[in-house]
């Protein structure tokens, strides 16, 4: 019983901080996105392509979450976008307090989009609200079309789903219609984008949708 109470306290404290983060972002008209995916799904490459489609027209910043290291942060920094690294040192997800602790490290004046790249995981990040406006899940074709059925919580909570690496459809056993059906069963109205960062297929539709969300947030 004590363990359950401690876990509840942790979750309640996180929700409280997430609400503060969300209000802080909204008051400054910053659209915060929480990017979630399994390791190897192409999340960082997807983020790079998204940044290239928005920057420098819009002011952006990135929070990179990893267990250790700053490899992905250096990739983002090379694009000329402000980035701050959070290392969880073994933790499988970011939480709202971690996000709050690094906001002062970024110049958020006039910021339009704040991308938070979560730790590679489809399980733990689903449980922790960061205060984001949009939770975006990236599913890659090599992972298999069964992932929405196996990890329903994260797909049911998503505000957008990216089916990435569509250029590999002919090489992998991925039933894209089955994947979309399972996603729709969990989350009927969520926008789903079929996308290849390698060929550029689908990027325009994703960027148009994202820009429209930024306009609504203004």
Image (cartoon, rainbow, N blue to C red):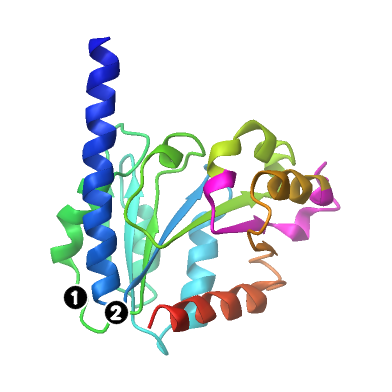
Which residue ends up furthest to the right in the rendered image? 170
Q: Residue at x 15, y 53 (%)?
A: 101
Find residue 135 and name its label.
none
Where is 178 relative to 103, above or below?
above
165, 207: nearer the viewer: 207
Q: How many marks?
A: 2
In which quadrant of the rendered image does the C terminus lie?
Answer: bottom left
Quarter of image, res 73:
bottom left
Tell me which segment is drawn in magenta: 155-177
Q: Which residue is mark 2?
A: 111
Q: In the rendered structure, does residue 117 fall within the stretch colored magenta?
A: no
Q: Residue at x 33, y 65 (%)?
A: 62
Q: Position of residue 160 (x, y in %)?
A: 58, 60
Q: Is residue 107 left or right of residue 117?
A: left
Q: In the rendered structure, does residue 161 fall within the stretch colored magenta?
A: yes
Quarter of image, res 207:
bottom right
Q: Is residue 131 left or right of residue 140?
A: left
Q: Is residue 199 left or right of residue 11?
A: right
94, 19: nearer the viewer: 19
Disc 1 and disc 2 in contact, CB within 8 angstroms: yes
Q: Position of residue 122 (x, y in %)?
A: 52, 39
162, 13: nearer the viewer: 13
Question: What kind of element bears circle 2?
Answer: loop
In which quadrant of the rendered image does the N terminus lie?
Answer: top left
Q: Which residue is mark 1?
A: 107
Q: Residue at x 13, y 65 (%)?
A: 104
Q: Position of residue 70 (x, y in %)?
A: 31, 52
Question: What kind of element bears circle 1?
Answer: loop
Disc 1 vs disc 2: which is toward the camera? 2
Where is 93 relative to 82, above or below?
above
One can see residue 26 in this view: yes
């Amino acid at each position: 019983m004590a363990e359950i109470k401690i876990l509840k306290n942790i979750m309640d404290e996180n929700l409280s901080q997430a609400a503060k983060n969300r209000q802080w972002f909204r008051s400054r008209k910053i659209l915060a996105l929480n990017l979630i995916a399994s390791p190897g799904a192409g999340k960082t490459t997807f983020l790079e392509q998204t940044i290239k489609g928005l920057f420098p027209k819009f002011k952006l910043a990135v929070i990179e979450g990893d267990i250790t290291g700053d490899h992905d942060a250096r990739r983002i920094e090379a694009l000329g976008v402000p980035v701050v690294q959070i290392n969880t040192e073994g933790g499988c997800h970011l939480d709202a307090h971690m996000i709050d602790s690094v906001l002062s490290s970024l110049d958020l004046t006039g910021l339009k989009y704040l991308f938070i790249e979560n730790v590679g995981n489809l399980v733990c990040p689903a449980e922790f609200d960061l205060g984001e406006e949009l939770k975006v899940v990236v599913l890659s074709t090599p992972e298999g079309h069964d992932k929405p059925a196996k990890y329903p919580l994260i797909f049911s909570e998503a505000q957008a789903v990216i089916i990435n690496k569509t250029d590999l459809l002919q090489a992998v056993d991925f039933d894209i219609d089955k994947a979309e059906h399972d996603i729709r069963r969990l989350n009927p109205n969520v926008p789903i984008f079929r996308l290849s960062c390698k060929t550029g297929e689908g990027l325009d539709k994703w960027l148009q949708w994202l820009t429209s969300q930024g306009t609504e947030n203004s």
